[in-house]
Image: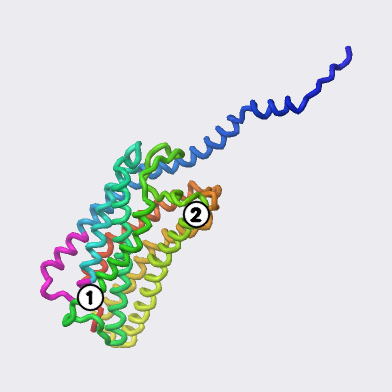
Amino acid sequence: MEDEKITVTEEDWSDFYENYNYSDWNSYYEGSEMYDLTEVVNFEAVFIPVLYSVVFVVGLIGNGLLLGILARSRKTWSVTDIFILHLGVADILMLVTLPIWVAQYMQSDGWTFGTPLCKITGSVFTINFYSGILLLACISLDRYLSIVHATHIYSQKKPWVVQASCLMVWFFSLLLSITDWIFLEDVFDDRRGRRECVHEYYKFGENAVYYWRLASRMIYLIVGFVLPSGVMIFCYSRILDQLRCGAQSLQKQRAFKVIVAVVVVFFICWTPYNITLLVEVFNFERNNTLFSGRTSLEKAKTVTTCVCFIHCCLNPILYTFVGVKFCC
């Protein structure tokens, strides 16, 4: 029997492509993607509520005691005490947003509070984050001028100058939160299968997503870390040099240790998160897709964010409870 020839026409090929089922390939890709996201979601659901709750309680107690001590001694406030007062308020306002974020990660439905509260909570967090960091820079600058140059820009005779500086810090922080008011939305994440309070950059077009995300990250890195870090390193290094040159009294030795502790704790708490942000920025394609290490990067971001919050708990200890005056 002769082999029967089969002729495949162009119409047959067209029909083949139209009716071929690609679901196996799609389900494989989506399955691996969902596995990664499910792992991240499960990790966040356990890790974030526990640590955020601990930070919230400890930070609220510490900063509450700080404000209580300052309130009792308000007649003898120094310039640094006024900055520390504003720092304590900023830390508390940032801490009170934590229970809402905890609720988002504990609920299977995710964010259930709507867009208005999403914008308010995110903006309040951003305002107090920036104000806290900038107030730390102001404290270091005030100490540097008074100790190294014996110059007092701020004095008890002109308390309005200190208050004006603090108001400028709050106003500048408010300006930096404008992107939160614009972009934060209550949206449903198809990949995670729940609602989340996130920055929705797509409202200005898909082509602008990459640039808005990059701009927001770089502003955060420069204003929220690089500039304050530079100010603190410069000011405290000069202060330490000045203390070493003078008489080595017990008070100066304690002040030396406090300054070292302030700088070391700041960088331990904030450097890991900012490094993670840099890695995230450089691993984003313009189509908003991460490279293969996304799961690890998401976990690292979660852990380092929690470490940042620990700094709110340590501020009262570093700046008040030690009881050391840097001035001679």
Q: Which mark is residue 208?
A: 2
Secondary structure category for the residue under label 1 = helix
Residue found 28% across the figure and 53% down from its top:
55
Identified by mark 2, the residue type is Ala
> With respect to residue 179, does 34 lie above or below?
above
Q: Earlier in the sequence, mark 1 or mark 2?
A: 1
Cβ atoms at labels 1 and 2 below 8 Å apart: no
Residue bounds of the magenta highlight: 62-82
Tell me the mark number nearer the camera, choosing from 1 and 2.
2
Residue that protrudes farthest toward the top in the picture: 1
325 left or right of 189 in image: left
Neighbours of disc 2 within 10 Å: few (<14), some (14-19), many (20+): some
Q: Where residue 275 sits in the image (x, y, percent)? A: 46, 60
| Real-space CA distance between mark 1 and mark 2, rounded to the nearest whole angstrom | 40 Å
Q: Which mark is residue 212?
A: none
Residue found 35% across the figure and 37% down from its top:
109
Identified by mark 1, the residue type is Val
Q: Quadrant of the N terminus?
A: top right
